Amino acid sequence: MISIIGAGKVGSASAFNILRFRVSDVVLIDINKDVVKGEALDMMQAAPAIEFDGKVKGTNDFSEMEGSEVVVIVAGAGRKPGMTRFDLINANSKIVKSIVKEVVRYAPECKLMVVTNPVDIMTYVAYKESGFKRNRVFGMGNILDTMRFRSYIATELNVSREDIRALVIGEHGDSMVPLVDYATVSGIPIKDLLEKKQIEKIVSLTRTSGADVIRLKGATTYAPTVVIAIMVDAVLRGRNRVMSVSTFLQGEYGFSDISIGVPVILGKNGVERILELKLSPEAKKQLKKSVSIIKDMINKLENNPLIEEFPSKDCMREE
Ligand code: LMR
């Protein structure tokens, strides 16, 4: 069983994807009791048509997450057109901190997956606040960026999206690092098939893709909610998928005390292993920039008088 905290569009659609892909039963939790109950009811009414037997419960009672193998935090404000993800930092860090306290109380053995933006900072907050080992706290960001990167490569080449393999690392934000050197079509480097200008266009579209959707329709839904289901599936079924997630670094890639997107093996224990790739000088430079942007935000957060006690004094780190 898994729990999703936050029954807005992304939380609810993620729950629905997890059910219809037959990944797990879901407890959907939100402070808005009626809405969350309504969402669960609506999903169950769809079940006979697509023949899933999974159960979904909508509740405002945090204790219902007890026994969850994975808890996904989606709650928080989403950015509006013209905003960056960093504009959400103060409001969302308070929300994430308060939810993590409930998670520690009711699901202390879970793997904690963070979706709330800015996701790298919120993953850091959740890691510090939970006291969990770092493998159990990770964020969804770069997998979504990678899907978008793959999608744009496929469109440019007019080939099946299925055959594109690629990776994006770094911040889930404007400074993300699409790794062109590791992008292939059925093993063929895209650099052998595309002109430099075409690749630059793809990289630029990947970086702005979230904002492009938000400008047009106000929020992103389909892509993030499918990615959430894929990540939950990787953990619950111990699939050891290789994907970029936001994870706490302790010296990997030369950086420490930061949560940022890097490739990992995602399985039963959450982050089973961080994969350290050989990066080109340009990718190294871009990753360093991404790190300094996130660190800057973390420092601002730690010094922000609105965010009391960061991390809370009663937080104990797990050995
Ligand atoms: C996304 O990339 O779809 C999410 O992080 C939402 C956003 O603000 O872009």
Image: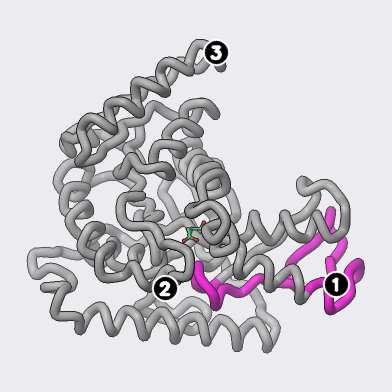
Question: Residue 261: percent from the left, percent from the top?
Answer: 50, 67
Nearer to the camera, 9 or 309? 9
Within-10-Å neighbours for mark 3: few <14, some 14–19, many 20+? few
Nearer to the camera, 149 or 137? 149
Q: What element carries label 1?
A: helix
Does label 3 point to a residue whose CB lies under 8 Å from ligand 1? no
Tell me which corner region of the image, top left, top right, bottom left or bottom right, holds residue 310: bottom left
Q: Mark 2 points at which residue?
A: 249
Mark 3 or 1: in front is: 3
Could you tell whether 149 is left or right of 137 in the image?
Answer: right
Do tag 3 and tag 2 residues touch (Cβ < 8 Å)? Answer: no
Q: Name the residue under label 3.
A: 49
Residue located at (36% from left, 43% from top): 8
Residue 191 is tagged as 1
- Three-letter amino acid code at the position of disc 2: Leu
Question: Residue 247: percent from the left, percent from the top?
Answer: 43, 65
Question: Residue 291: percent from the left, percent from the top?
Answer: 46, 82
Tell me which corner region of the image, top left, top right, bottom left or bottom right, holds residue 11: top left
**Mark 3 or 2 closer to N-term?**
3
Do tag 2 and tag 1 residues touch (Cβ < 8 Å)? Answer: no
- Three-letter amino acid code at the position of disc 1: Lys
Question: Residue 119: percent from the left, percent from the top?
Answer: 40, 63
